[in-house]
């Protein structure tokens, strides 16, 4: 009887220890994914509400979609919030994105970059890409009038405050460097 209770006690202790370890690992992020951007000052044009970020050297400048082209020369990038994605997919804006020399980020788009690049597709008609779990997609000008795109997810596909802030830090780093590290998408 004593050995059965000892085994049961050990099992309970092991289960409790396993629970604590798993809970801790789920509630913390890998430090490389949680590192704030520490580069140069960035000026971001913001269509919609600016996100809450950790970086003091990043400033958001409120603009509307119609001002993107004229304001782009003083900006490092443009962010478009979820509330404006439907309007941002209008064919006239697809032409503007292709003419800009800075990246344009579409925050929480469930359609990736597709309706913002292809003039003939509306936001509603573009394929749903929400299964890829991206938090943001950016159209990025490349050499020779080509366009590329970047996608940013959140750590472990969990949209917690710290994971979202880490995703913004990765976006700022990409803006600063002009590229993304494929291993850190």
Image (cartoon, grey):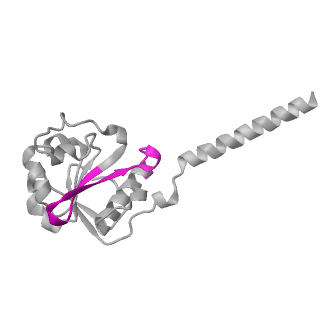
Residue 5 within the segment the image draws in magenta: no
User: Which of the pair 129/20 is nearer the observer?
Assistant: 129
Residue 159 within the segment the image draws in magenta: yes
Q: Quadrant of residue 112?
A: top left
Q: Quadrant of residue 9?
A: top right
Q: Residue at x 28, y 66 (%)?
A: 178
Quadrant, the N terminus: top right
* Residue with the most extreme bottom position: 40
Q: On the picture, is 147 further left or further right than 179? A: left
Query: Across the whole image, how many numbered discs are drawn on residues?
Result: 0
38, above or below 89, in the image: below
Q: On the picture, is 2 further left or further right than 34? A: right
User: Which of the pair 168/138 is nearer the observer?
Assistant: 138
* Residue 180: percent from left, percent from top: 34, 61
* Residue 161: percent from left, percent from top: 42, 49
Magenta residues, start to end = 137-162
Q: Residue at x 12, y 62 (%)?
A: 71
Q: Residue at x 13, y 67 (%)?
A: 73
Quadrant, the C terminus: bottom left
* Residue 106: percent from left, percent from top: 24, 49
* Residue 150: percent from left, percent from top: 29, 55
85, above or below 74, in the image: above
């Amino acid at each position: 009887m004593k050995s059965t209770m000892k085994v049961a006690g050990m099992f309970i202790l092991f289960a409790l220890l396993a629970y604590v370890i798993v809970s801790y690992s789920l509630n913390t992020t890998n430090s490389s994914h949680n590192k704030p951007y520490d580069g140069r000052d960035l000026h971001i044009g913001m269509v919609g509400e600016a996100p809450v970020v950790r970086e003091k050297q990043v400033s958001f400048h409120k603009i509307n979609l119609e001002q993107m082209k004229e304001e782009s020369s003083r900006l490092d990038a443009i962010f478009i919030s979820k509330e404006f994605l439907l309007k941002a997919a209008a064919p006239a804006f697809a032409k503007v994105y292709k003419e800009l020399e800075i990246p344009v980020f579409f925050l929480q788009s469930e359609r990736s970059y597709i309706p913002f690049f292809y003039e003939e597709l509306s936001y509603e008609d573009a394929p749903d890409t929400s299964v890829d779990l991206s938090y943001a997609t950016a159209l990025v000008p490349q050499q020779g009038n080509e366009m590329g795109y970047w996608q940013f997810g959140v750590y472990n596909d969990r949209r917690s405050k710290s994971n979202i802030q880490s995703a913004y830090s990765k976006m700022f780093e990409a803006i600063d460097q002009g590229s993304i590290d494929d291993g850190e998408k």
